[in-house]
Amino acid sequence: MPVLQKNRFGFVLKVLIQPRSSKNIIIGLHGDALKIKLTAPPVGGAANKMCIQYLAKSLKMPRSSLEIISGQTSRKKSVLIKYKDGDDSQPERKRLTGLIKALLETGK
């Protein structure tokens, strides 16, 4: 599966989380996932929560638009980036694609 895959609800982004880092930063691509270092520890869902917060901030989207759909207890996660208000229109797809491409480029 590629780093980013479109589905009927939005896009699924594969991420690899490295918890307990000295700062929150996107490292770049690591295999088939976007590697992100987070300061939060991997206990009590803290790293998951920070992952959503950090991605939302990076994508300039509300946190409610992002959801971890697999890998809640793993370093490798799949994050659903939902279409805005269920809007599967061409402009919304273009907007999301542009945001995600910019995010992937910042990690290079």
Image: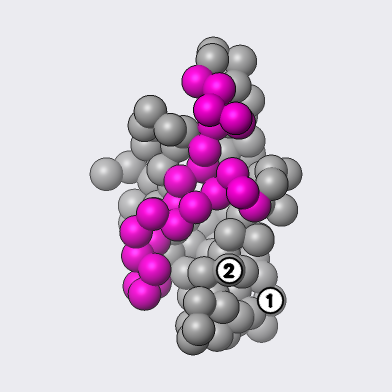
Dot 2 surroundings within 10 Å: few (below 14), some, or many (20 or more)?
some
Query: In x, y percent, where is residue 74?
Result: 35, 73
Q: Residue at x 54, y 13 (%)?
A: 90
Q: Which residue is mark 2?
A: 49
| Cα distance in 3D space between marks 2 and 1 | 15 Å
Q: Secondary structure at mark 2?
A: helix
Specify the amino acid type for callout 1: Lys
Is 69 left or right of 25, judged from the image as shown? left
* Furthest residue toward top: 90
- Judge whether 90 appears above or below 61 on screen: above
Picture quadrant of residue 41: bottom right
- Is 97 a magenta residue? no
Specify the amino acid type for callout 2: Lys
Confirm or deny contact between disc 2 and disc 1 (CB under 8 A): no
- Range drawn in magenta: 63-88
- Judge whether 68 appears above or below 83 on screen: below
Camera sees residue 31: yes
- Position of the N terminus, as image quadrant, is top left
Q: Secondary structure at mark 1?
A: loop
Q: Which residue is mark 1?
A: 23
Closest to the observer, 71 or 103: 71
Q: Residue at x 69, y 46 (%)?
A: 62
Query: In x, y percent, where is residue 51?
Result: 57, 64
Dot 1 surroundings within 10 Å: few (below 14), some, or many (20 or more)?
few
* Furthest residue toward front: 85
Picture quadrant of residue 25: bottom right
The earlier-in-sequence mark between 2 and 1 is 1
Mark 2 or mark 1, which is nearer to you? 2
- Is 78 a magenta residue? yes
